[in-house]
Amino acid sequence: MASGLPKRIIKETQRLMAEPVPGISAKPDESNARYFHVVVAGPESSPFEGGVFKLELFLPEEYPMSAPKVRFMTKIYHPNIDKLGRICLDILKDKWSPALQIRTVLLSIQALLSAPNPDDPLANDVAELWKVNEPEAIRIAREWTRTYAMGN
Amino acid sequence: MSDDDMGGSGDEDYYNDYYSDGHDPDVETLDKTLQDPEYFEFQCLTDTEVERFINERVEELSTSIQVTPSLAKVLLLMCQWNLSEIVSSYRADAHRLLIQCQVKPSMPANNNNTSMVSANLVSATNTSNRSTTNTPFPSNVGLMSSTSMEKAGDCVTLCSSSSKSECSSRDVVCGSNAIIQQESDVKECCCPVCLCAMKPSESSQLSCCHRFCNSCWSTYFDVEITQGITTRIECMSSHCEVLAPEDFVVPLLPRTRVREKYHQFAFADYVRSHPELRFCPGPNCTIVVRAKDNKPKRVICEACNTQFCFACGCDYHLPTSCETIRRWLTKCADDSETANYISAHTKDCPKCHICIEKNGGCNHMQCYNCKHEFCWMCLGCWRSHGSEYYECSRYKENPNIAHESVHAQAREALKKYLHYYERWENHSKSLKLECQTLNAIRTRIHAKVMAGTGTWIDWQYLLDAATLLARCRYTLQNTYPFAYFLAPGPRKDLFEYQQAQLEAEIENLSWKIERAEMTDRGDLENQMDIVEKRRTTLLTDFQP
Ligand SMILES: [Zn+2]
Ligand SMILES: [Zn+2]
Ligand SMILES: [Zn+2]
Ligand SMILES: [Zn+2]
Ligand SMILES: [Zn+2]
Ligand SMILES: [Zn+2]
């Protein structure tokens, strides 16, 4: 199965399985070693606390020369994540470096959940509310977490 | 307008005294500019000539501050080819300049996010075998001195000596929020990208000491070059901005095709970053225009005849500035829906209401039914229109607009924009119709000559007039974006007055050309003089 899979991906996968990042699970798909099923637990004392968020992560042919493709599958109310689950994160775009790894990407996403950044928005309406009325935005984010990210 | 006072006699004396020989090229250029506001000195260069021009600058910098040509290229590119400034800041503080130009890292490598922390740790404890210890960047950055070469070698040996010790690698995460997590990652000294063990001889690093295997560098360069990135390739390490110069990149490119691509894209980068050079925007044209002044003046490509603005490379647009024409064109694109309704080619005669189609460039219309003469733009009677003050081109702003409702203000803003847009659009259409007119004139001349009314040379003046008309209409078209963005005040009043004068004379010329006979030659040539004078006056008074 792993024929033609770069050593780097094999090593990264092995390490992700052996020493998982706390609060994150990433498992390669049985039929495609470049496709990962990711589950991120909502960080403590964030509006996403208690939620379980599913993501998909795909390593393109050019990886690590180009960034992994990551997307939220679970609906989330967040200024840097849009309706389609796309994530606005610099290291997934122009600030990608081949020296970064899957692990670092997942850590950044976890950090983004702890500290949303409405000044660099992807979902404009969410960011707008986050800036003018943060308590209300946090209330909605909690509600979405309860509705979409719990009990599954 | 401030250019006006340069023509004063006092200033001329000053120049003549100052440049006693009276042949200073700058003064000559100034004189020519005063005579013809569109005068501009430029050269059309072939790619071999541009290459020579670029290489000469590189050579010059390379010898004057003793750096490799490859490093000289980085410095020139990062400093917009300002050679004298580079030399002086290099002499004042070379270290600072090299950091500014992303040749050296802004922070010492061991404070940076690095995957080769061990190499730096070892180097800190192992200072006994280092010749110089005062530099925190033990690497060759293209400086031509023996000590820096030693330092480069130093770095390599340190790296190999650490290859058996345990490497600690750092994961640095910088999303919207930067967190740093340090972990013991890789158990042997290996390339942080492919995670394979690497020999010092098969790996490379820039001045930041981020070492990667050559095979990873090659793949990385391949990906970057395919995306058109050449002179701005940064180190592979996360958030490290050190640039990979040509002599680092090219030897690591295994395929000739990629190497050719690198040189081709890098060449384009050098041209684009040079304030004296501009690619001809003509289709498939490889000419590069060179001019000493980076001004929004008209250049005409010798090879393909394309006319364009030297400063921005777009269609020539004087008297409007590059910045204003860009705003205007963006606005037109945004508002194209709203403005669409006015693009119709037909209007009703204001007197007998018969439908009239515009089929020539002239805005002075005559109804074929009732013979009423009127203006296509404002539908006003031509007789009163053409007299003392040509009001058609001017937009009269509502003086009480500040007290009106938001809706009324929005309506007023749209009305104002449409006023200018209609006229801009109309002159651009007239210009296209003028091409048809030119063909019609050719046919007419042919018929006249064949019928024995004059010779070819007798009729030549009519073609000259049509060419002049096209040039004047082009300038007139470009006065509308300028007027639209001009703040109300005496300057705007003066501009719109001159614009109105120009417009009136252009329409007179257009009318005369469409109806010219051989006997009208003197009259027409007189009109040509008047129009061209109005045009140059406006361009001189309102230089951007
Ligand atoms: Zn490697
Ligand atoms: Zn680096
Ligand atoms: Zn050309
Ligand atoms: Zn321009
Ligand atoms: Zn009529
Ligand atoms: Zn009119």
Image: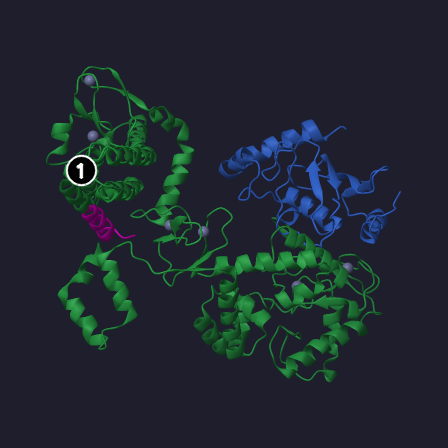
* Left or right, A26 with reference to B99: right
**Relative vertical location of residue A34 with respect to residue B433 in this rendering, above or below:** below
What amino acid is labelled 1 in the image? Met
Residue B420 can be seen, yes or no: no
Q: Is residue B541 magenta?
A: yes
- x 23%, y 53%: residue: B540
What residue appears at the point 65 percent right and 74 percent down from the top-left corner? B140
Residue B536 in sight in this render: yes
Residue B233 drawn in magenta: no
In the displayed structure, does residue B464 sit left or right of residue A88?
A: left
Q: Position of residue B434 (x, y in %)?
A: 30, 35
Q: Chain B colour?
A: green
B376 or B396: nearer the viewer? B376
The crowding category of the residue bearing disc 1, from other C-alpha atoms within 10 Å (few below 14, some 14 to 19, many at least 20), is some
Please state the chain letter of the residue tagged with numbered disc 1 in the rendered image.
B
- Disc 1 on helix, strand or loop? helix
Quarter containing the C terminus of chain A: top right
- Relative to the observer, which residue lies in front, B35 or A93? B35
Count every numbered label the image shows and give the total: 1
What segment carries the magenta color? Answer: B532-544
Residue B388 placement (x, y as % from top left): 10, 36
Q: Is residue B317 above or below residue A54?
A: below
**Where in the figure is residue A131, as x and y percent of width and height?**
51, 39
**Residue situated in front as seen by the camera: B291 or A34:** B291
Chain that the image shows in blue = A
Left or right of B496? Residue A51 is right
In this view, the residue in front, B68 or A118, is B68
Q: Which residue is mark 1?
A: B518
